[in-house]
Image: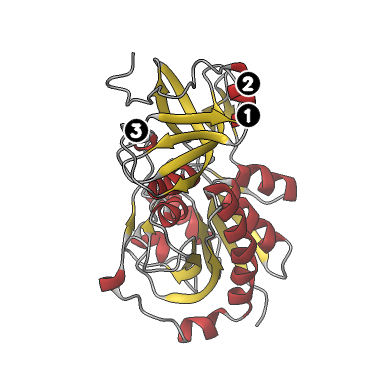
Amino acid sequence: MAALKLIFAGTPAFAAIHMRALIDSEHQLIAVYTQPDRPAGRGKKLQASPVKQTAEAAGVPVYQPASLRDRDEQARLAALGADAMVVVAYGLILPPEVLAAPRLGCLNVHASLLPRWRGAAPIQRAIEAGDRETGSTIMQMDAGLDTGAMLATARCAIGAHTTAASLHDELARIGAPLLVEVLSDLPGYQAGATTQDDSQASYASKISKAEAELDWQRPAIELDRCIRAFNPFPICFTHLQGQRIKIWQARPAGSAPLPETAGTILRADRDGILVNCGSGQLAIERLQLPGGKALSAAEVVNGSAELFAAGACFSPSDVAS
């Protein structure tokens, strides 16, 4: 198939990795759409998205409309004369006029095995739910939320130590070449597209900071999954003697029921901080005290042994004191 004239729409680093693959391919990237620059960092200075930075470095024109519902914006996009538009974690809704503008329509790279985990946070929700595998899906976009026909998929395992950060990187690694492969014969892949089974769909709602607070009444195995799912953002947390403690890494470390209250520290040493849970125990291996950086449990216990003494109890925010 001849090289395609492409528009790319995306915003975060995950999208930039896929866009880089298009820049390095035989296809012609004629325009890039990304969200407007946002304030970031301590100084709250406007910062360009990873997609914008990558596009500008490659000399590709960048457009940053606040919305694509404006008719002038839609006309400008249509006038580009693209064969197809590739969308990866863009963050803006594409109205029907935009979906219909490119000759071969709009494609989306979604970080799950659709129809499982449609929505904003498929990487985190797959880990949190205990899924054994996930993947990347190339989808023909329609007016629904991640409901379009599937053109191709690539699978990868979710292991006992997989975090959202590591899964993000793996899905980008397998998704970018899959996208290029689909574009090499887009009409052929479209002809063989598979309709999603809506009865098997699940929704990956956006992650909130509030849900990252650990509920020690839950089983240790579930808390471990939450900690991995919310690493590197928003990072799970709990409270101890009025201090907000961030938990970066932990592991299930026992399943036998114990009489101690959920959240009670059973022991703290170089092997970790062992905490009783609603079911089983959790060994905290890496954590962060207020104002400090993330350290190993051995380092934290060495400097704050009294705080993590056996018998102390982690508490939710509404009873922290």
Q: Which mark, by number, is residue 302?
A: 2
Residue at horizontal 55%, vertical 18%? Answer: 305
| Type of the residue with mark 2 | Asn
**Toward the viewer: 44 or 320?**
320
Instruction: Give how far across and how far down residue 242 sits, in percent.
Output: 39, 15
**46 above or below 162?**
above
**291 above or below 147?**
above
**107 above or below 282?**
below
Name the quadrant of the C terminus: top left
Instruction: Give how far across and how far down residue 243 sits, in percent.
Output: 43, 17
| Type of the residue with mark 1 | Ala
Question: What's the distance in space between the residues labelled 2 and 3, CA to CA?
Answer: 30 Å
Question: What's the distance in space between the residues labelled 1 and 2, CA to CA?
Answer: 6 Å
Q: Which residue is mark 1?
A: 298
Q: Which residue is mark 3?
A: 210
Instruction: Give how far across and how far down residue 189 sits, in percent.
Output: 52, 82
Question: Circle 2 sits in a helix, a strand or a loop, which is it?
Answer: helix
Look at the image and tell me whether residue 139 can be seen.
yes
State which mark lies toward you, 2 or 3: 2
Residue at horizontal 73%, vertical 50%? Answer: 58
Question: What's the distance in space between the residues labelled 1 and 3, CA to CA?
Answer: 28 Å
Question: Circle 3 sits in a helix, a strand or a loop, which is it?
Answer: helix
